[in-house]
Image: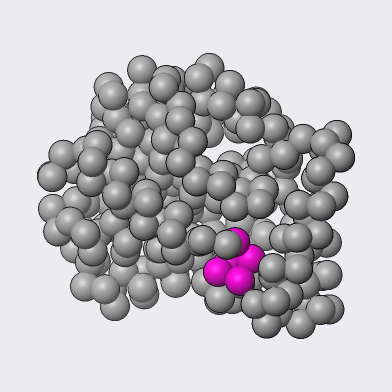
C-alpha cells in the first residue's frame, strides 16, 4: 500500500518548498491581501483567545499573519511535507511564535479527535486533492475538529474545464506570473507541472462539498483569476 504521506508530499520537495514564498507571490495576484483578509475575518468572528487549525500550513504564512495580530491565538500546523514544515518552523521561530505553535506532520484526520478548534484555515490546499471523495473527507476531517459554529476560511483554484473562458484565465495567469520576473522557460515548466497536479472543480461544486461535509453559510470574500476564497461555519 502506498504511503499516503510520501505520496502527498512529493510535489513539495526541498527545491519547490524553498522557492514557494517567492513563486506564490509572483503567481497569485493579491496573495498577501488574501491572508490579510483572512486575518480580518477571524478577528471579526472568533474569540480573543482561540485555537486555530492550519490545514496545509506550508511555510507558515497564515500562522505569522494571524499570530502577529493576536498574541492569544494558538495554532496547530498540519502539513504532509517535511520540507515545508521545516521552513514553517524556522519562520515561526523567527517571528517569536514557536511557543504558540504545535506542528503535526501528516493529515488532519490523524489529529486527536478530542482536540477542538475555534477556527481553521485551508489556504491553497484542496485543489491538490484529485478525487471528490478524498476532498470531501478532507473538509469533513476539518469540520469534525471544529467547535460548533467554528469558522473555516478556505481558498482554492476553481474552474470548469468545459468553460470557454478557462483558456483566457490561464493565459492571463501565465502572463501575470511572467511579468513578475519569472523566466519564460520556468513559467512553462511550472504551469505544465501545475496543470498535471491541480484538480479543477467549479466554484458551485466546491461550495456543495463544504455544505455536504459539516459546513453552512458559505460566502465568497476573495477572487483573483482562477483563485477564490470563501468562509463558512461548522454546522
Number of marks in the image? 0
User: Residue 97 or 222: which is nearer the viewer?
Assistant: 222
Work out which quarter of the rendered image holds the C terminus and state it: top left
Q: Residue at x 27, y 22 (%)?
A: 148
* Majority secondary structure of magenta residues: helix
The image's colouring method is one colour
With 200 as the anchor, is 208 left or right in this view? left
Q: Position of residue 94 (x, y in %)?
A: 29, 78
In the rendered view, does 211 fall on the left or right side of 90?
right
Percent coordinates x, y for residue 101 in the rendering: 26, 58
Viewer can see residue 155: no
> Is 71 displayed left or right of 172 in the figure?
left
State which quadrant residue 64 falls in. bottom left
Figure check: 116 above or below 33: above
Relative to 233, residue 10 above or below? below
Relative to 129, say whether 81 is above or below.
below
Instruction: Give the magenta-colored segment's residue range.
Output: 24-28
Instruction: Say which quarter of the image contains residue 185.
Output: bottom right
Q: Is residue 227 magenta?
A: no
Question: Could you tell me which residue is drawn at 49 percent across and 36 percent down?
Answer: 220
Residue 230 appears anywhere in the view: yes
Q: Residue at x 56, y 47 (%)?
A: 223
Residue at 19%, 51% in the rendered image: 73
Quarter of the image where the N terminus is located: top right
Of 114 and 230, nearer the camera is: 230
Give the x, y percent position of residue 232: 40, 29
Instruction: Name the side, left or right, on which 43 lies relative to 106.
Output: left
The part of the image, by quadrant, that contains residue 133 is top right
Find out whether residue 25 is within the magenta segment: yes
Amino acid at each position: 500500500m502506498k504511503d499516503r504521506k510520501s505520496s502527498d508530499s512529493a510535489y513539495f520537495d526541498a527545491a519547490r518548498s524553498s522557492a514557494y514564498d517567492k513563486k506564490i507571490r509572483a503567481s497569485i495576484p493579491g496573495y498577501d491581501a488574501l491572508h490579510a483578509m483572512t486575518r480580518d475575518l477571524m478577528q471579526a468572528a472568533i474569540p480573543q483567545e482561540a485555537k486555530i487549525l492550519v490545514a496545509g500550513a506550508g511555510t507558515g504564512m497564515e500562522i505569522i499573519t494571524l499570530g502577529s495580530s493576536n498574541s492569544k491565538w494558538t495554532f496547530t500546523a498540519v502539513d504532509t511535507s517535511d520540507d515545508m514544515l521545516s521552513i514553517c518552523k524556522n519562520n515561526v521561530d523567527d517571528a517569536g511564535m514557536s511557543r504558540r505553535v504545535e506542528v503535526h506532520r501528516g493529515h488532519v484526520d490523524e489529529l486527536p479527535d478530542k482536540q477542538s478548534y475555534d477556527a481553521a484555515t485551508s489556504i491553497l490546499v484542496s485543489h491538490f486533492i484529485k478525487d471528490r471523495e478524498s476532498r470531501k473527507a478532507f473538509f469533513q476531517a476539518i469540520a469534525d475538529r471544529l467547535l460548533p459554529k467554528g469558522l473555516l476560511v478556505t481558498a482554492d483554484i476553481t474552474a470548469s474545464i468545459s468553460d470557454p473562458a478557462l483558456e483566457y484565465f490561464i493565459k492571463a495567469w501565465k502572463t501575470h506570473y511572467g511579468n513578475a520576473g519569472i523566466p519564460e522557460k520556468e513559467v512553462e515548466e511550472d504551469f505544465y507541472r501545475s496543470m498535471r497536479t491541480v484538480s479543477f472543480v467549479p466554484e458551485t461544486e466546491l461550495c456543495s462539498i463544504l455544505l455536504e461535509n459539516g459546513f453552512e453559510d458559505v460566502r465568497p470574500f476573495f477572487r483573483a483569476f482562477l483563485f477564490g476564497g470563501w468562509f463558512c461555519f461548522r454546522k
